[in-house]
Amino acid sequence: MRENSALKAWRGGGQTIGGWLSIGNAYTAEVMSGMGFDWLCVDLQHGMLSYDDLTYMLPAISTRDTIPFVRVPWNEPYEIMKALDAGAYGVIVPMVNNAEEAAQAVAACRYPPDGSRSFGPIRAAMYGGRGYAGEANGQIACIAMVETAEGIEQLDAIASTPGLDAIYIGPSDLGYALGLGPAAFDDPLHVETVQRIFAACRANGVAAGIHAGSLAFTRKCLEQGFNLVTLGSDGGFMAQAARKDLADARETAVAERENTGY
């Protein structure tokens, strides 16, 4: 079976940089896959795309060595299984509140006897290659997002869930959970909570991830030691470049844009 190079790096304590795909288009997915990201995540939760888009975006990513992940809309086993059957090499599961929910996500990612994933890797086996059925449990990444008040409270229980590969922080929802709002990344309580989540990952032997969304924040997170960091999204990169070039052409200041976090 094709190796999950991102997961291998995390297991060895290494660091990876990923990109976010929020536009439902095979061309943008293929362009992003050619940039050299370690992994790309197709966003079915907040992205402007559907499962139908996923079926041609994952093959577009497969033209390169970039590892394809999917953020599923919710912690629903059928959503997780369909994403994996389409060829995702891991899922990011939002709003995981406790150990029971984390275990549910893990079970949906693993074939019996390790979990409850139903067998039917329609495209996954073609992408993964020979040996998929026997090796998928060790190659598919299960990543839980800790970004709610209950999730913070149950952090250690979530991080110690057997089979969980990583915890991924959504800084904006984390800000809401802390009563700070979606853009309070520099608030001492937010910084302290991010560090607490990072420490729990280290203590329990799971990879630590975070949605950075900017070069400066990405550098900071890598210096801190995070294993998976999202540099930015397809839509964000496009808007950033267009905004700058347009301002340069008009010789005006770069227009401000509302930060959506993605």
Image: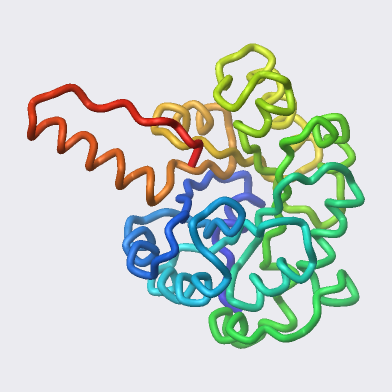
Residue 192 occupies quadrant = top right
Could you tell me which quadrant the N terminus lies in? Answer: bottom right
The part of the image, by quadrant, that contains residue 188 is: top right
Residue 51 location (% of width, % of height) = 58, 71
Q: Which of 8 and 217 is in front in this view?
A: 217
Quadrant assignment, res 184: top right
Nearer to us in this view, 120 or 205:
120
Is residue 175 positioned above or below 122 on the image? above
Apparent side of residue 100 relative to residue 126 in the rendered image (left or right): right
Image height of 79 relative to 37, above or below: below
Q: Which residue is drawn at 80% across and 80% down?
A: 118
Question: Residue at image x 88%, y 43%?
Answer: 98
Q: Nearer the viewer, residue 240 or 200?
A: 240
Tell me: 80 left or right of 20.
right
- When the figure is inspected, residue 136 is found, relative to residue 93, above or below; the finding is below
Which color scheme did the rendering employ for the protein?
rainbow
Question: In the visual, does 208 lie left or right of 67?
Answer: right
Question: Where in the figure is residue 182, as x and y percent of width and height?
Answer: 59, 27
